[in-house]
Image (spheres, grey):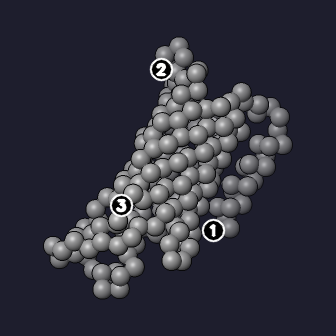
Amino acid sequence: MKFFANCIFSVAAALMLNPAYAYERKFELSFGTSQMLVDEVDRVDVKNSKKIILPTTGALLISEYLWSERWGTMLAANLPLETQKFLVNNELVEESASATCLLGQRYTPFNWQITEKASMSPQIGVFVAAMVGEKLELSPTVAGRIHINDDSGFTMYVGSSASYGIKGYVLFYGIGHRF
């Protein structure tokens, strides 16, 4: 966990100290939806059972500070809108789903110009996820998305993430604006 934190803060510090990374729009705010597939269960009678995970819909808020065209620091909050559901022995099991927060660095390897005013780029990121429930669980997370933005600041994206420690996968999409 310390390794991920050191990587995130080292890249952020290097980018802050180099004024060559001036970028005209410094902040992006976006809202979206997520489909969470999390294998973590609190109930002891279900914990080690073979189960089918049903997606949990969530509301996603992402804020990002843009260090340059290629680098950004992201903070995301994923708030579940329904209970977490599993099928165990053909019975529906429900429990409350935990909110998740992510903090980390994202990198854009290249941009494709798709029109005169819009570009599309793949983005990858390394994050620390905090699952907020009865107890706080931290987990390393990787994410990727296809991001489209135009000269007016409009953005939209679709992507996915995977967390190692909490055994979770998330599919997400949304729209936003760069300021």
Residue located beneath label 3 in the image = 82
* Residue 149 position in % (x across, y down): 53, 28
N-terminal label among 1 and 2: 1
138 on left or right of 34: right
Indicate which label's residue lies in the foreground, 1 or 3: 3
Percent of width and height locating residue 71: 66, 40
Q: Earlier in the sequence, mark 1 or mark 3?
A: 1
Cα separation between marks 1 and 2: 38 Å
| Identity, as a three-letter code, of the amino acid under mark 2 | Ile
Who's the residue at 59% across and 61% down the image?
A: 128
Residue 157's disc is none
Residue at numbered disc 2: 114
Query: Badge 1, how many Cα within 10 Å: few under 14, some, many 20+?
Result: few
Q: Secondary structure at mark 3?
A: loop
Residue found 56% across the figure and 52% down from its top: 76
Residue occupied by mark 1: 1
Residue 68 visible (yes or no): no
Q: CA distance from mark 1 to mark 3?
A: 30 Å
> SS of the residue at dot 1?
loop
Q: Amino acid at mark 1?
A: Met
Residue, x 65% and y 31% (percent of image)? 179
The Cα–Cα distance between marks 2 and 3, rounded to whole angstroms, is 37 Å
Q: Amino acid at mark 3?
A: Glu
Q: Is residue 161 above or below residue 63?
A: below
Residue 3 at what x, y percent from top left?
Answer: 67, 64
State the image quarter where residue 67 is shown.
top right
